Amino acid sequence: MSEYTGDANFGCFDENTFYREARKYLDNTPGTKQGFALYAMEIENFRIYNLWHGREAGHAYVAGYAGRLKSYAEKEGGVIGCFGDSHFAYLVPEKEDRVNELQAYLNEWHKSKEESAGFHPMIGIYHIDDVSLDVETMYDRAALALDGVRGNYAMRIMHYNPDMDKELDEEIVMLSDIRRGLKEHEFTFYLQPKCDMRTGEILGAEALVRWIHKEQGLVPPGKFIPILEKSGFTVIVDQVVWEDVIAWQRKWIDAGKKPLPVSVNISKTDLFAINVPDVLIGLCAKYNVPHHLVELEITESAYAEHFEEMKDVIGELKQAGFPMLMDDFGTGYSSLNMLKRIDFDILKFDMKFLRGSEEDRQRGIEILESVVNMARLLIVPVIIEGVETQDQVEYLTGMGCRYAQGYFYYKPMPIADFEELIADGSNVNYDGYVSKRVEQIHMREFLEDMPATEMMINNMMGPVGFYDLYEDHIEIIRVNEPYYKLFGEGASQSLTVIREHTTPEDYEYIKELMAKAEDAPMKGAVGTFHYRKGDGKALPVLFRVFFLHEKNGHKRFYGSVTDLSMLGKM
Ligand code: C2E
Ligand code: CA
Ligand code: CA
């Protein structure tokens, strides 16, 4: 333990003394060319550090940090204050690259400490342009800049600028309005059903907070949750939602109805602010609601940042019998390895990650496929969120997904509407989500696992090719052996130029099919036409085509053809 043990200020000035001493320092120190700056510093997530390593270790950690700061100030001058916990203020003569030098000096020490990852200091800087300003205001400005880096692990330093005051004003207005709204019971939740895509049956719902503002009407969470998260106040709203949801479950059971699991959202800042397991267990006890009816959704990014800590809280919640859902899975950095180490009951993937540019879509599909594969390996069910169209349902069920939540089924709805929806239970499935290991053949797995030769695969797939459509011109760029066998025989003209093998009408028709395929990327398009072989014979074929991607005006398609001549005359 360090020499500062027992000293709440770790041998630095306490807040009031700091303001006094800093004033004296400014008044009595001849200004350097670059003037002075006030740094506000904080060890982010320090409460977590205490929680996981104990208060004593936490104290030693801050003491070490304070010692390092003091030894820096001894060399470089300035005044250091410690405002309790993990907050520091440093009035320092400015010089070129000052903050980077200080940070490097602190990091040297951090690196030598075990388990310091995620507990590095953040720094907000107010460059003192007006020395007559009172030091409290200077510190407030530096602290405001500090708030700008909170939660941003890529950027640990920020300078104050006057716009921050304006932003803060707006946020403060919003926060007070939220507090007022909470007092006046303006917050409620909507319920969005989760469905089985194969039957359309409802298995549960997600509770989504809604603010019914007395003047502004319905305020969506996107408008206020981010502001709450920034300031760490999400918990004041979340606790209300959790309690309301649990109370609603009780009411539903008391009405003699069969209950369904409802999930609530937990923000990662909640986990830092309160003891979430204690609170939830307490609420369930208060309303006598079994834990398995309260599912908990936590976004994936929360785990990625504080893996070890999250793992413990999640373990605790799971141990208590709350089903754990990983929200927005696939957006962060989770790996199969991490999934194996944290025990989730359900993974949620959001279709919104498939929106955007072609590149985004392609990447989204790859992620979705790997999510589904991981889930299958772990035998964990997946719920796909944001399902909006029939095409998506077909594509998703085709790849083995079973559960969905999205506008295609239901939008989030007021509690009364949900009650009406499930009242007679005919459209409800009370069996819960299941995951079977292998229900059907999944192509990717199939191809990977099967020691098939190219010839075997060719025989299974039949004739296939890749097509390029550029302006009005369709060209075949690659074909497999069966394709060549079917059409190549007796080829006197170029095999690759489609126009030379069809009538003008059929050629237009093929382009129409391609346009259709482009509009329905999941389903593709299918039609028949005649292919004129090199020897002049016209072969009836069934053509199934899928759009792949577009680059520089070139649209790429994948197509399979089936020889229909065996079926007799068309
Ligand atoms: P989330 O947890 O990922 O919730 C899903 C969001 O997707 C909801 O938006 C829902 O209305 C929307 N959604 C569902 N199906 C579709 C669809 O087919 N298409 C489209 N375009 N959107 C769909 P909402 O209700 O606006 O909530 C947004 C986010 O706010 C939530 O994302 C969640 O992160 C947060 N949130 C909502 N309620 C709470 C809460 O009680 N506590 C906390 N901490 N966060 C909440
Ligand atoms: Ca959610
Ligand atoms: Ca989500």
Image: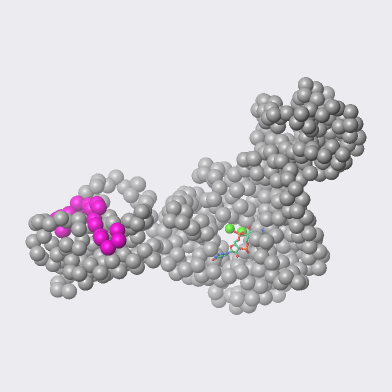
Q: Residue furthest front?
A: 33
Query: What range of the chain is rendered magenta?
Result: 470-488
* On screen, residue 21 above or below 268: above
Q: Residue furthest top?
A: 75
> Which residue is pictured at 67% across the width and 45% down the height?
151
User: From where the camera sits, is residue 376 visible?
Assistant: no
Q: Where is residue 64 in the image (x, y as percent from the top left)?
A: 76, 27
Image quadrant where one finds the N terminus:
top right
* On screen, residue 189 above or below 453: below
Ligand 2 image position (quadrant): bottom right
Q: Position of residue 533 (x, y in %)?
A: 13, 62
Residue 236 in which image quadrant: bottom right
> Which residue is pictured at 82% across the width and 39% down the height?
130
Image quadrant where one finds the C terminus:
bottom left
Residue 187 in which image quadrant: bottom right
Q: Where is residue 436 in the image (x, y as percent from the top left)?
A: 46, 57
Q: Give left or right: position of 413 versus 357.
A: right
Q: Which of 497 and 540 is in front in this view?
A: 497
Q: Which of 280 and 444 is in front in this view?
A: 444
Snapshot colouring: one colour
> Which residue is pictured at 52% across the width and 53% down the height?
380
Q: Which of 541 and 147 is in front in this view?
A: 147
